[in-house]
Amino acid sequence: MNKSFSILSMVAAITLLSGCVPSSSVGSLSQNQVNSVIKKLDCDELVEFKTDLFSDDGMIGFDCRFNDRESLMFRQYDLPTTVGKNIEDWIPLVSENNKLVWNTNWFAIGNPQDLSALTQFEALEGAQQIPKIVKKTNADFWMQDCGAYVVTSVSGKFGLDTSPTSNLSKYEVMVPGLTEWLSNSKSLQSPEIQSAIKDRDLSKVIALLSEPSSGAKDLCEAQKSKWDN
Amino acid sequence: MQQLQPNTLSASQNIVISETQGSDKADDLGGCDYRMGVAMPGGEWAMSVDGCGFIGTSDTSTWQYSWFIDTATYNSSDACVTGRGYIKSGSSYQPNWVGLGCGGQGGGAVRIGNVASVAKNQFRVFPTAALIPAMIQWK
């Protein structure tokens, strides 16, 4: 087993270092460019993110789902440093058919052929650098934790996961208003979220909660200053 | 800024195959030990070292996180803990952080799907009157 894992790790590392993962140093995509990429990809199903519930930063993103191959997942943040703060969690997903590309403010992972839809705008030059991990701030860690409390509570409420729902009273101490939001949020009762819950599609639930109108991120941002020391 | 090293994925000593004998729940086949973590009071965060390595073998594979406050050894605050998992989007996976509870102990089966990675925790002191660190054992 150790050998298997070492091989997987080595493949991922070599993939990152071999030049198969191009990068460049400038640019971020406008909403129009993102829309053009989505149109070109011709996804079988599109899931759009309006922000990152687990991050202090603003974000736009999408998962372009295909029936016959890997999804293309794109995340673009307002701040360049946020890519370096979040990229580590995505590295284990890199494989032969699931490459990672990135730029100053964004990264994407998916099938190499599909990723070319992004490179047309960014003129990736195949530089040999790899993303740099940036240390998270207390605010970053709070938003990540709080996002986990919120999403886990939603999962528990609707039976999407084996979540420790008995902890809701303690999460309420950390995130005042969470219990009321869970009970009264109209967003949680929307047909779109209820459909995603029925499909047990947690990724889509999170995407729908990223709509500003859901108020999910507001719960966390309201407490951010308490932890941002 | 710290440059990502190619051994990021291979930091773990213990590898666990997450599907065994018809179950989709991760088993501790690698003799994975508990790790120690410390969270300071006053809102300080603490990110764990890499935990056990796991390899998910099906869409429904999970990793069983477990943690407790080490009151046998230390005078410790209660804590809140989150853990990293992976959820499916279409035919691919993406990272997802999951709440593993607050108090003196907790845990849960976290989805990892068909992903090879390492367990990762994040913890902070649960607000209490006593301003002492939380001493956490986790895996």
Image (spheres, coloured by chain):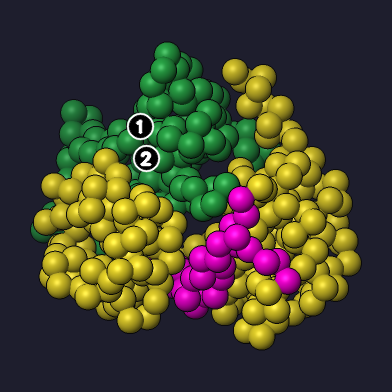
Chain colours: A yellow, B green
* Disc 1: which residue: B64
Task: Report the span colored magenta.
Answer: A40-67
Count of marks, rendered view: 2
Marks 1 and 2, how far apart at CA: 6 Å
Q: Secondary structure at mark 2?
A: strand
Looking at the rendered structure, which numbered label has been put on residue B19? none
**Image x and y of residue B57, in percent:** 53, 28
Quick check: B133 left or right of B25? left
**Image x and y of residue A62, in percent:** 56, 67
Q: Are marks 1 and 2 on the same chain?
A: yes
The residue drawn where x is 64% and y is 58% is: A72
Task: Note whether A194 is above or below A152 in the view shown.
Answer: below
Comparing B90 with A67, the one in front is: A67
- Chain under numbered label 1: B
| Residue A125 in sight here | yes
Q: Secondary structure at mark 1?
A: strand
The residue drawn where x is 70% and y is 42% is: A95
Q: Quadrant of the C terminus of chain A?
A: bottom left
Three-letter amino acid code of the residue under disc 1: Gln
Task: Note whether A43 is above or below A164 in the view shown.
Answer: below
Task: Note whether A139 is above or below B22 in the view shown.
Answer: below
Mark 1 touches mark 2? (CB < 8 Å): yes
- Chain under numbered label 2: B
Comparing A70 with B66, the one in front is: A70
Based on the picture, tell me whether residue A60 belongs to the magenta stretch: yes
Circle 1: is it few (<14), some (14-19), or many (20+) Cα within 10 Å? some
| Residue A13 in sight here | no
Q: Quadrant of the N terminus of chain A?
A: top right
Based on the picture, tell me whether residue A56 belongs to the magenta stretch: yes
Looking at the rendered structure, which numbered label has been put on residue B110? 2
Three-letter amino acid code of the residue under disc 2: Val
The residue drawn where x is 62% and y is 38% is: B9
